[in-house]
């Protein structure tokens, strides 16, 4: 008797939150000083919920968000004794590529533009006067771009996102832009979960006479059943089966588990396209052994499969014949 246990790795979609605001405190460095108080709570010019299409090409825009910071209190003044301050505006987030910052969400980067000063971060602003009063307000546009495979949405936590420092005095920080109001990113494509993450397929008792001329038994049908919700588009369903006992297995035969007593046989799994090649459990598209099973919208979706025994060269010995696979689902 063979038991095939299928463990699912579920790819879920999350939401993303963005906030804005700016805080400041007195500090000094070398020949420059910064005095005053600057707190710039945010007002918003965009909806705080964005829907993004994960099937966009890498480099394409997924959505934009615009916000403005206003200073309700006294001005902050930057004074340098030798020369006009050089203010460099950048992000607290690391660079993913030139001009594109990480968002902590795999596959999604962001560009940030300061509309008031007319620059895409990072940029250096040569102040026109000394002392220089930091602006009473700034307007920013965050543009989200696809940088790789997007398995889900996510969240940018509240905290610093934009900063400015004095370029010519040891990078003394003079400005912090804080995310304080949530923005939700939703994928346009549905999210799918399995109805039965773990299950067993019983092939029953098999004798030598049950193997055909090609050395195979009659396949036993089963399916991975999904329930998909959310989004307004359809999503492509990509599937990978991995050998639970030998994750490096890249063949079309599934070996027996160590607790099996039978010898001289293996298992094969077929999908709607034919014989399955096993592959590694990896996130993303184009992985070894992965196949495109089909597309689904909101509702139910089934991945039809079958499994059978196959004889190996050499002698065969009766006994228990168990094995296992895991499956990985990726969506685009």
Image (spheres, rainbow, N blue to C red):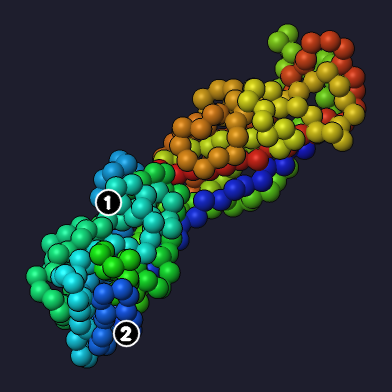
Q: Position of residue 223 (x, y in %)?
A: 60, 39
Residue 118 as seen in the image, left or right of residue 281: left
**From the image, which quarter does the C terminus lie in?**
top left
Seen in the picture, residue 195 relative to 93 is either above or below; the reply is above
Name the residue that disc number 1 marks. Answer: 99
Q: Nearer the viewer, residue 314 or 69?
A: 69
Q: Is residue 258 visible?
A: yes
Crowding near pointer 1: few (<14 within 10 Å), some, many (20+)? some
Residue 182 as seen in the image, left or right of residue 66: right
Task: Specify the quadrant of the image occupied by residue 204.
Answer: top right
**From the image, which quarter does the N terminus lie in?**
top right
Q: Is residue 188 visible?
A: no
Instruction: Name the residue at 33% across, 66% down.
Output: 170
Instruction: Name the residue at 70% across, 46% down.
Output: 199
Name the residue that disc number 2 marks. Answer: 26
Q: Which residue is most to the left?
A: 128
Q: Nearer the viewer, residue 60 or 188?
A: 60
**Secondary structure type for disc 2:** loop
**Secondary structure type for disc 1:** loop
Foreground mark, 2 or 1, reads 2
State the CA–CA distance, disc 2 to disc 1. Answer: 30 Å
Circle on res. 3: none
Crowding near pointer 2: few (<14 within 10 Å), some, many (20+)? few
Q: Nearer the viewer, residue 97 or 145?
A: 97
Residue 204 as seen in the image, left or right of residue 69: right
Instruction: Name the residue at 63% across, 51% down.
Output: 196
Seen in the picture, residue 245 relative to 126 is either above or below; the reply is above
Q: Position of residue 105 (x, y in %)?
A: 43, 56
Instruction: Name the residue at 16% across, 70% down.
Output: 83
């Amino acid at each position: 008797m063979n038991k095939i246990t299928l463990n699912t790795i579920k790819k879920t979609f999350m939401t993303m939150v963005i906030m804005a605001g700016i805080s400041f405190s007195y500090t000094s460095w070398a020949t420059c000083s910064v005095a005053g108080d600057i707190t710039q709570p945010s007002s918003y010019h965009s909806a705080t919920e964005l829907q993004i299409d994960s099937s966009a090409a890498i480099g394409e825009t997924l959505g934009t968000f615009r916000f403005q910071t206003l200073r309700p209190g006294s001005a902050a003044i930057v004074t340098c004794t030798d020369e006009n301050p050089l203010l460099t505006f950048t992000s607290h987030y690391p660079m993913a590529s030139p001009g594109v910052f990480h968002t902590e969400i795999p596959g999604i980067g962001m560009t940030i533009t300061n509309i008031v000063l007319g620059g895409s971060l990072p940029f250096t602003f040569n102040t026109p006067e000394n002392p220089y009063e930091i602006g009473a307000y700034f307007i920013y546009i965050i543009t989200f771009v696809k940088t790789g495979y997007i398995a889900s949405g996510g969240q940018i936590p509240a905290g610093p996102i934009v900063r400015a420092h004095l370029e010519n005095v040891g990078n003394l920080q003079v400005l912090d832009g804080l995310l304080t109001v949530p923005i939700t990113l939703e994928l346009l494509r549905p999210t799918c979960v399995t109805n039965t993450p773990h299950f067993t397929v019983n092939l029953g008792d098999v004798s030598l006479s049950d193997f055909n001329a090609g050395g195979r038994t009659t396949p036993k049908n089963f399916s991975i059943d999904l329930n998909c919700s959310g989004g307004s588009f359809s999503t492509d369903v990509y599937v990978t089966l991995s050998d639970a006992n030998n994750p490096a297995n890249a063949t079309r035969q599934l070996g027996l588990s160590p607790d099996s007593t039978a010898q001289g046989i293996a298992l094969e799994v077929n999908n709607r396209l034919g014989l399955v090649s096993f592959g590694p459990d990896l996130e993303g598209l184009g992985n070894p052994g992965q196949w495109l099973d089909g597309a689904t919208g909101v509702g139910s979706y089934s991945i039809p499969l079958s499994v059978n025994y196959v004889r190996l060269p050499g002698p065969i010995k009766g006994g228990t014949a168990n094995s296992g696979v895991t499956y990985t689902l990726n969506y685009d």
